[in-house]
Amino acid sequence: MIPARYQASRFPAKLMQDLGGKPVIVRTYEAAVNTGLFNEVYVVTDSPIISDVIKEIGGNVIMSKTTHESGSDRIAEAVEDMDVDIVINVQGDEPFIDAESLEKIIKVFKNDTAKEIDLGSLMTPITDWDEISNPNTVKVIVDNQDFALYFSRSPIPYPRDKEVEAPYYKHKGVYVFRKRALMDFKKLPMLPLEAKEKIEAIRFLEYGRKIKMVETHVTGIEIDTHEDLDRARKIWK
């Protein structure tokens, strides 16, 4: 499921920007389909403009209502009546999503025979301080079993002691839900930390749920700004 909102707050209409001759949302949809990992791939949107470009390439679209607080809320509306076990949420601004990373996170659920993990997500190591300190880059810190402790737009951990080596991880815009967890997400009201940071994964942490993080070294670009789009175009070439 690819949530696709036309009026993004930081970069309106970013999903319709050209990336190598096709809109960003089309590139993301095609990347998800081309992994060959999924029974079905849908774009979930409130925008007739986005709906039309996906239908033009023969893609699947679900129209949703406009007023959703997050992409996961939009996805929850779409799958409520579907007979599915696992739902993967790939953000619409992730045109470089890859099969290798997705296979890693799907494997977590295949191996979880006791069905103890409700939500999984991806993280990639980062070392550049400009990226670490950039509020458009969401960082995550994890415990010794790779369960998320917190997500933030601020640098975490804060480097008070320069002598201590600690990794920094960037959170990638991919979530894997058990359907029941996604339905729970839809019912849970947003709390202050999520509202403050504008990071939907925090909602699960605020309600005491666990998020299993999976490390990937495949890097891409999530298109949040005009500068990201410029970098994406250079990589695409």
Image (cartoon, rainbow, N blue to C red):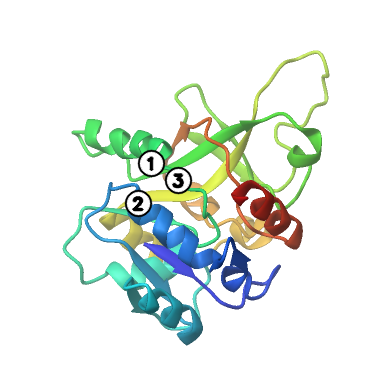
- Looking at the picture, how far across and down is residue 156, in whole percent? 70, 35
Quarter of the image for residue 89 reads: bottom left
Give the quadrant of residue 116: top left
Residue tagged by mark 2? 34
Question: Badge 3: how crowded within 10 Å, few (<14), some, or many (20+)?
Answer: few
In the picture, measured across the screen, residue 113 lies left or right of residue 99, that is left
Which residue does the image show at 39% across and 35% down from the upper left?
100
Q: Horizontal and vertical percent for residue 88?
A: 35, 53
Q: Check disc 1: other Cα within 10 Å, few if <14, some if 14-19, many if 20+.
A: some
Kindly identify which numbered label has been placed on residue 183: none
Given contact means CB atoms under 8 Å apart, are the residues at marks 1 and 2 in contact?
A: yes
Find the distance from the CA under tag 1 to the CA under tag 3. 30 Å
203 relative position to 74: left or right: right
What secondary structure is marked by label 2?
helix
Residue 208, horizontal then vertical, whole percent: 45, 45
Mark closer to the observer (1, 3): 1
Residue 187 seen = no
Of the image marks 3 and 2, the number of the one nearer the N terminus: 2
Question: Residue at the location (49% across, 70% down)?
Answer: 4
| Mark nearer the viewer, 1 or 2 | 2
The tally of labels here is: 3
Question: Which of the pair 35/168 is nearer the observer?
Answer: 35
Above or below for 152 versus 58: above
- Nearest to the eye among marks 3 and 2: give it: 2
> What is the three-letter code of the residue carrying label 1?
Ala
Task: Please give the residue where the numbered disc 3 appears in the rendered image.
Answer: 208
- Closer to the chain start, of discs 1 and 2, is 2
Give, as a three-letter code, the residue at label 3: Gly
The disc at residue 99 is 1
